[in-house]
Each structure stands twice: as C-alpha cells, then as structure tokens.
Image (spheres, helix red, strand yellow):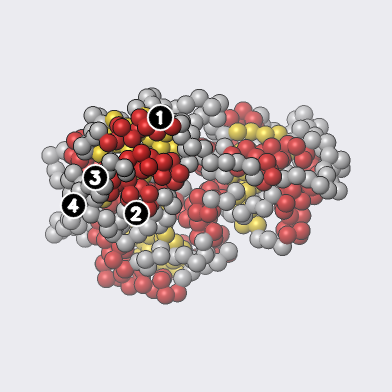
C-alpha cells in the first residue's frame, strides 16, 4: 500500500462529514483512491478558496468535521482569506494540502507552507515520513476535533512511498476524544455569579451560539430574574416572538435596545464570546457587571484565541463561569430559584424600525423592503446565509419573528466580503432538506460567481439574492460622505442573471416587489439554483452607516 492509498484509508476510518477540494498533482491520487474506496462524492470547486469556503459552510451547518484538499504552493495560498475566518471561528475543518516533493530542491511551486499557514492563524501539521503517517494524520484530526482548523502538509514524493507506518489496526482520533466530559463550574464562583445576578435590578441575558439547545434553561433564568433577552449575531432568532426580546446585541442593535443596554446593571452572557461585534467595541453596556458562561475562558472585546494560545481579549468578565452551558445554567438556577420566582421584566421589548419609503424619483427598490418581502413569503424552514457588506444590516434587522436560532449563518470573523455564496453552497449540500437563501451584494457575488456551476453540478437547492447597487456600495457611500468622488466605486455590473443561466441555473432581474415575491415562491416550489438580481437604491444607508456617515439624516 502506498502512502496516498493509506491517506484515503485513514479518511474513510475517521468518519468525516464531507470532502471538498480542487485537484492537483499533489493530491489527485489519494482523492481518486478515496472515491474508489468509499463511493462517496468528493465536491470539486472551481477555486481553492471557494472549496475551503464550502467546507467551512458545511461544517458550520452540521458541526461535523469536514475535509478540504488543495494542491501545494499556489493551491494553498489561494485559501488564505477563508482559512483565517475559519480559524478565528474554531471550525472543525481539516485542510489536506499537498506539499512540494522533498527530493526536488528547485521545485517551482515550493513554499514554506508551515510559515504561510501560521500567518493565517491556523495550526500546521506535517507528514514527516512514510513511517510516521498514522501518528501525523491522527494528530491533525485530533487537533481539528478539539481546537479548530488544521492544515496537513503532505509532500507528494512521500505519498508515493510504501506506507510502512500504516497499521491495519489504525486507532482513530474519535477514540482519543471519546472520553471527553462536561466541565462544571466551581461552587464558590457559582455562588458569586448568583449573587451578582440576584443583586441586579436591570439584567439582560445575551445568548450566543453556544446557548443553542439550552433555550429552556435560558428562559427559566429570564423568568427568575426579570431579565430582558438578546442574542449575538450567530444566535439570531433564538428569542423570536418573545415579548422580552431586544434583538441583536452589538453594532447592529436597534436604538431602543441600545438604551436598554446603557441602563443595564448586569449582563449575563450565555455561550457568547462577547467579541467586538457583540459588545460594539466595548461601548454597548458600559455600566453593567458581566457574568459569562462559556466552556473556555475568553477575554471580552475580542473573544478568539490565537494559535499560540494567547487570549485575544482586553478585559475579562467580572464573573466567569467555566462549564458546559446547560448543566451550568441548571446549577445557577439551583442557586437562584429558592429565593426567586417568576419576575416581570424591567422593561418591554423594542420596536423594530418600519420599512422606509424611497424618494419618489428613485427607480430602484429599498433594501429593507426587499428583505421584508423575503421575510413575508419565505418558507419557515428556510436557512439564510448572509454575506458581508453594506447590505448585511438589512437581513439582520428585517428577517424577524418567524425564525429559529439555526436559521442564520454568517462568516464574519475576518470581515471579508465574497464569502457568502461558497458558505451557502456548503450549507445547502449539508442540509438538502432545507431551502437555503444567500443574501449578497453584487461586488461580493462576483468574487465567486463561478461556483454557481459547482452548486448546479451537485444538485444544491439554493436561492441567491443579490442586492445590486451597481458597484462597491460601502465604499461609494463612505467616499460621498467625505465629499470625494465616488465614481471609482460605482462599477457597471454585468448581466448576473445571464451568468447564472450560463452555468446551468436560473436567473432573473428584479425591479418590483411583486416580481420578487413570485420568484421566491417559484424557488420554494421548484428548488434548484436560482439567482435574483435585485436592483436596490444607491441612496439608501443602513442604520449603522447613517449613524456614522450622516448623523443628521434618519436611517
């Protein structure tokens, strides 16, 4: 057995969720062998960065370890942007990268891949030799399952050697993590947290992605304390319809919610890292004591951990409870409930902003009206993947009241546009029983529009809504606010609908809300890959942009 055959064998045993990639000299043999052995589909993208984006989207949608593979050198360098975002989010993503042959000193695609990967804030593991294959690849899988993304560098001359180190009794990384147990908080810290919460008169609970599945316990805590409710961006929808819901915590918080946060004397963060998004750079609740419930100690303001293990935050919570969310909440309630029954919330829920009207001479649609129409007619089981850009505030604000906490997905950790479509393809392939809708800008979609072909090839059911303001809307609005020429940011957009049709999907240009509703209903009835090129106004500013760029003008 050759090393490349052994790699395929190990992947089969490690029970990966899915495999995505772009084939090249340094990974093609083990890919062909893996498909032959397992009969499973390998999802081939048109671009290496897109392949990692799809694998990331698949892993976020399922929580399963997902594999992506690229060839050496330029194949690896093309994944940088998405790899940083995945690493910052701790996604269980293993990238198996070919590496230059050890025996060719002048190989033109050679690169110090370890240095490159570490510059992308990601762990790097090397295939050291044919003898160490089992240990090296198992370590990579173990770190991926327990910490986050890993790039495994496999020189392709080593892949051609006999796999003398591969055992028929290979023990998988699953065996190494099987004994993991739930962490529970220290009793004294638990009592201190209960006292902090019980002594507050205006508490707010902020639930993050780590609180998904613990909604009953979170609501019991709100009942016992009179707390209002909010979520991080990654847990949006968790409290839809609850009269205590403030919506999002962070830079996208509504004006009334901001007032509640400013008045709060205690914030209980449940499964939320409280990074700079969720705290609005530390300005959102300046007078509140913070109780944080997560399974790893994280600093506030920037809750990620760098590869070297250094905390990324600027300050810690006033009281930090380390533990699995549900048992920690149960223990906390045990401390609170003997002296507290159901308490009325200290303030009511906030009012969402109405859909504004455009100026009479504006021929295009208002971003808010587009999202409100989508909110009205989309199937309740839909999942939304929201791309970054000027337009992304609108779906976070106007998709409301009908959705659960697993209805939203966003790759925001690196602040990069161009990530939404590929993440949505991965999610759609992961959960084919759900209709997926990706909301992107025209500048973003053109960074990866070739992957519509990938979505069609693998039978994804995906609706692509392009909020098309004909250019780089964020930059244009900022230049205009500075009194500078915004012309360079206003670029003519090609016929996006025709591009979608050319790649085997369907496409339509949308100018009215009636046409938009009909197109969404058609997608829900027929599925497939459909792109809606929705022409939106160049004059509209999102709430945050209006506050920052034109503070005297209503959002």
Image position, residue 226 (x, y; %): 24, 45
Instruction: Please say if the residues under marks 2 and 1 sit with CB atoms less than 8 Å apart.
Output: no
Q: Where does residue 306 sit, x and y in percent of width and height? A: 51, 29
Q: Earlier in the sequence, mark 1 or mark 4?
A: 1
Quarter assignment of residue 364: bottom left
Separation (CA) of disc 4 from disc 3: 19 Å
Closer to viewer: mark 1 or mark 4: 1
Image x and y of residue 212, in percent: 42, 50
Q: Give the CA distance from mark 2 to mark 1.
A: 30 Å
Q: Which residue is mark 1?
A: 189
Name the residue carrying label 4.
Answer: 351
Side of 224 relative to 145 (left or right)? left
- Left or right: 93 with respect to 289? right
Q: Is residue 462 visible?
A: yes
Earlier along the polypeptide chain: callout 3 or callout 2? 3
Q: How many numbered discs?
A: 4
Please tell me whether mark 1 sits on a helix, a strand or a loop.
Answer: helix
Residue 80 rendering spot, x and y as whole percentages: 54, 38
Image side of residue 399 versus residue 313, left or right: left
- Tell me what residue is drawn at x 50 percent, y 54 percent: 61
Q: Which residue does the numbered mark 3 point to in the structure image?
A: 226
Give the vertical position of 220 relative to 100 (above or below).
below
Name the N-terminal-most of marks 4 and 2. Answer: 2
Which secondary structure, mark 3? loop
């Amino acid at each position: 057995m050759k090393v490349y055959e052994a790699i395929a064998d190990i992947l089969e045993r490690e029970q990966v969720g899915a495999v995505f990639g772009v084939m090249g000299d340094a990974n093609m043999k083990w890919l062909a062998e893996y498909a032959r052995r397992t009969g499973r589909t390998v999802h081939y993208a048109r671009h290496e960065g897109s392949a990692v984006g799809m694998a990331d989207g698949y892993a976020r949608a399922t929580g399963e370890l997902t594999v992506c593979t690229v060839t050496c050198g330029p194949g690896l360098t093309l994944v940088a942007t998405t790899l940083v975002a995945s690493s910052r989010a701790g996604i269980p993503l293993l990238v198996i990268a070919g590496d230059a042959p050890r025996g060719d000193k002048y190989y033109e695609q050679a690169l110090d891949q370890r240095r490159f990967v570490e510059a992308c804030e990601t762990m790097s593991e090397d295939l050291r030799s044919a003898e160490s294959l089992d240990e090296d690849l198992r370590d990579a899988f173990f770190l991926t399952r327990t910490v986050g993304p890993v790039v495994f560098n496999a020189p392709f001359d080593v892949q051609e050697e006999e796999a003398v180190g591969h055992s028929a009794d290979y023990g998988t990384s699953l065996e190494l993590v099987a004994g993991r147990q739930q962490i529970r908080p220290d009793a004294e810290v638990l009592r201190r947290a209960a006292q902090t919460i019980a002594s507050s008169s205006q508490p707010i609970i902020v639930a993050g992605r780590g609180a998904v599945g613990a909604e009953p316990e979170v609501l019991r805590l709100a009942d016992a304390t009179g707390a209002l409710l909010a979520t991080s961006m990654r847990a949006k929808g968790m409290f839809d319809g609850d009269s205590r819901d403030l919506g999002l915590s962070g830079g996208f918080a509504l004006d009334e919610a901001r007032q509640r946060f400013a008045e709060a004397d205690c914030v209980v963060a449940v499964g939320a890292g409280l990074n700079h998004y969720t705290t609005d750079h530390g300005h959102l609740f300046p007078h509140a004591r913070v109780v944080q419930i997560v399974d790893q100690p994280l600093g506030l303001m920037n809750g990620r951990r760098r590869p070297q293990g250094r905390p990324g935050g600027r300050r810690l919570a006033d009281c930090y409870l380390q533990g699995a969310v549900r048992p920690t909440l149960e223990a906390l309630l045990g401390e609170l409930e003997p002296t507290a029954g159901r308490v009325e919330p200290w303030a009511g829920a906030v009012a969402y902003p109405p859909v504004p009207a455009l100026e009479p001479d504006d021929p295009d649609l208002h971003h808010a009206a587009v999202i409100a129409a989508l909110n009205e007619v989309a199937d309740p089981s839909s999942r939304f993947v929201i791309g970054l850009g000027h337009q992304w505030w609108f779906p976070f604000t106007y998709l409301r009241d009908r959705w659960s906490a697993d209805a939203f997905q966003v790759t925001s950790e690196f602040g990069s546009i161009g990530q939404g479509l590929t993440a949505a393809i991965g999610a759609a392939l992961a959960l084919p029983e759900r209709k997926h809708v990706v909301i992107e800008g025209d500048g973003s979609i053109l960074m990866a529009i070739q992957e519509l072909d990938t979505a069609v090839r693998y039978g994804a059911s995906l609706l692509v809504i392009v909020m098309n303001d004909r250019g780089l809307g964020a930059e244009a609005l900022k230049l205009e606010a500075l009194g500078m020429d915004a012309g360079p940011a206003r670029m003519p957009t090609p016929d996006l609908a025709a591009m979608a049709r050319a790649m085997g999907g369907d496409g339509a240009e949308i100018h009215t809300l009636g046409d938009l509703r009909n197109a969404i209903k058609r997608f829900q009835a027929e599925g497939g890959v459909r792109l809606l090129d929705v022409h939106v106004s160049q004059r509209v500013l999102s709430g945050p942009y209006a506050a920052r760029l034109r503070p005297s003008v209503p959002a």
